Image (tube, rainbow, N blue to C red):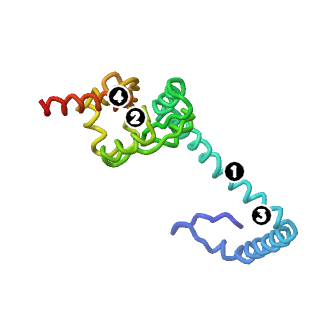
Amino acid sequence: MFIERASTYGYDPKWLIFSGLAIFLIIAKGSLQLEEWLAHHLKKFSIIIIMLLLMIAAIPQITLTHASVEEKKTTQQQVKDAGLWLKQHSSPGEIIYTQSPTQTTYYADRYSKGIPSTYEEFRNQQQQDKARFFIVSIFEKHPGWVYSYPQQHPEEFIPVQAYALTKDQPALVIYQYSPQQLQQTNAEVNASVEK
């Protein structure tokens, strides 16, 4: 009776009309039994469904997070290497100028502070704290004078260590700041002006 029979005019659904009441009663009975079962087990069933959905959603998240962490693990390796180098080549009380003070302080175990916005401010602060090391890197934004001044005054900013991304592209340079040489140069300039 549930099978549609072929007729000369195509399929005739009249046999389904006779079975409609029986199908309705079977679906109603199943719905009532499902409701009764869920009323007793709804809390356990809900918790199981939620746990399954969370596990299904968590697997791709954990996979993507792990891949992202592994990819980013060495992105600032040069900052870490510079901090470890500074730890070996500086004394514990020294101050380091860098635009990555948090990472440098962690790896170098030395107090680090941000680079002032002008050379004059840097010079005044450096005279107070007697900092020797100055770091320039591609990982943080620096004040404008930082990119040109060390190259224009190599007697004042002496590169002591560099780390590269590629053979031709430096990622980080550690300069040793030597204000004594600058003071000697200024003294020489003043002496030549007086003559």
Q: Which residue is mark 3?
A: 46
Judge from the rendering whether residue 187 lies leftward or rightward of residue 93; answer left or right. Answer: left
Q: Which label's residue is closer to the chain start, 3 or 2?
A: 3
Place residue 87 in its image quadrant.
Answer: top right
Q: Amino acid at mark 1?
A: Met
Q: Where is residue 61 shown, x and y percent of the image? A: 60, 47
Q: Which label's residue is closer to the chain start, 1 or 3?
A: 3
Judged from the image, the secondary structure of the residue bearing numbered disc 4 is strand
Judge by depth and name the residue closer to the eye, 102 or 130. Answer: 130
Judged from the image, the secondary structure of the residue bearing numbered disc 3 is helix
Please name which of the two marks, 3 or 4, marks the residue nearer to the observer.
Answer: 4
Q: Which label's residue is closer to the chain start, 4 or 2?
A: 2
Q: Which residue is mark 1?
A: 55
Q: Amino acid at mark 4?
A: Pro
Q: Where is residue 36 shown, x and y percent of the image? A: 85, 72
Inter-mark Cα distance, 3 to 2:
60 Å
Judge from the rendering whether residue 161 lies leftward or rightward of residue 27; answer left or right. Answer: left
Q: Which residue is mark 2?
A: 134
Q: Quadrant of the C terminus?
A: top left
Judge by depth and name the residue closer to the eye, 23 or 29. Answer: 29
Q: Where is residue 65 shown, x and y percent of the image? A: 57, 43
Judge by depth and name the residue closer to the eye, 8 or 158. Answer: 158
Label 1–label 2 contact, CB within 8 A? no
